Amino acid sequence: MKNDLEFLTNKEITRRDVLRIGFTTLGSLFVPSYLSSCGGGGSEDPAPGPSPNPNPNPQPQNNNPIINTSSLPDADEATSYAAQISASDQDNDVLTYNLTQKPSGMTNAGKDISWSNPATGDHNVNVEVLDGKGGSAAKNYILKVINKFDDISGRVNDILNGNSVQGADVILGHRDNGNFVADYTVRTDSQGNYVHQRIPTSRNWLVKIVHSNYNTHLAGSLQTNKDENNVDLELIPTSFNMAFFDEIMRPQNRSDPSKNGVTQKWEPQPTKVYIDVGRKITSGPTPDPIQVQKIKAVFTNRELPPIANGYWDINNIQIDDTGVNPAPARGELGVIIVFWGSQETGGYRENNNFIYNGGVTLLTSSDERVIRHEFFHASGADGHSNLENTILKITPPYPINYEPADISASRILQKRPPGNRSTADGPDANPDTYRIR
């Protein structure tokens, strides 16, 4: 022990020495003993204990906020919109709300979203919620804006020369006890343009056009479920003789009085003329070859008056006079059938005021006027009036010298949809059920 005490008193004790020393008690005196000299049976370097905790007071872990709102309520077009985002935070942190994607005009004040003038359609709305301590949550919504109003725009033109019409009133209205009632009215500008804004959607609007230098025109009906552009309308100048158009182009002697005076139009355009030289439809007389050539000339030489063919594409009509091919069915779409019988007639078959098939029955006469007269009927025109002589007159040499009114009537018929005879609502007033576009 003495050597041990000398060691302790004569030598500086290092940290390693301390770890190698144990202590024994002799009475009231603590006597250190050097473990290596006491022959202890343990390891010379026992394993160290656990490292002390570097942060004796750890902070609790931060939790991300949670967005509870599953969807946004629908909005109505052009109607102030408000909605609220619900979010929660387990740590009761103060939350901040941001819109990372939104439609133009939408804003938010905290969790409150507002939009003063919603536009129709589906819009992406991305919401981000922050807790200020590094925690966040994000959610994407699709906001549906329901269409409530439509804008309707277009141009009003002169039907004969194509020029724009300034100062025309374009009126949207409805019928009340048979009378037209105006609901919305706008006037065309110097370029003939008009715009109806914020018109209630999904309604059937009657369209009426009024101008002092033009015949008042009830253009038909227009029903929208979205904005409509390029709804172009046309007016007929008062200088044009509408009595001429009414008498020639609108049949008067119909078996169905409810359709008396209704303009007829081919749809689709006729694409084929079948001349029954082989007598495959009837067992009538053999056609005169000269007559067959004059029938073909109605199309090949454009001898069918323009008032009848102005809305046909003559170049695309095929003429079959071979007598070889099978005869088309009498109700086949877009075909005019010419055959011979006991009486000269011309007419057509129709669905919903549209012609889908025409037929011409002739004798062996080669009278050009008769041929044109019957084709005139097949075109949809009446032709039974004193004015027929102007349209169908034969003045050799060819071509026929048509009157200016003939050409104007052709342009009108080419552009107008099916319509009624002139009424108090205006010339060429279309049925209310007809949609402009």
Image (spheres, rainbow, N blue to C red):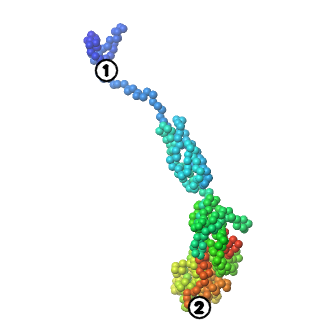
Q: Nearer the viewer, residue 74 or 29?
A: 74
Q: Quadrant of the N terminus?
A: top left
Number of marks in picture: 2
Q: Position of residue 373 (x, y in %)?
A: 62, 85
Look at 30% across and 14% down and name the residue there.
33
The answer to whether any part of residue 29 appears in the image is yes
| Residue under pointer 2 | 366
Residue 76 higher or lower than 300, as above or below: above
Look at 60% across and 79% down and name the residue there.
408
Q: Residue furthest top?
A: 27
Q: Quadrant of residue 201?
A: bottom right
> Does dot 2 land on a helix, a strand or a loop?
loop
Q: Position of residue 107 (x, y in %)?
A: 55, 47
Look at 59% across and 67% down and name the residue there.
190
> Does dot 1 land on a helix, a strand or a loop?
helix
Q: Nearer the viewer, residue 339 or 406?
A: 406
Q: Quadrant of residue 10?
A: top left
Marks 1 and 2, how far apart at CA: 138 Å
Q: Quadrant of the C terminus?
A: bottom right
Q: Position of residue 82 (x, y in %)?
A: 60, 48
Residue 30 higher or lower than 408, as above or below: above
Numbered badge on residue 15? 1
Look at 58% across and 48% down and name the residue there.
114
Amino acid residing under circle 1: Arg
For mark 2, does the 10 Å Cα neighbourhood hold few (<14), some (14 to 19), or many (20 or more) residues? some
Q: Quadrant of residue 275?
A: bottom right
The answer to whether any part of residue 308 appears in the image is no
Amino acid residing under circle 2: Ser
Residue 312 higher or lower than 278, as above or below: above
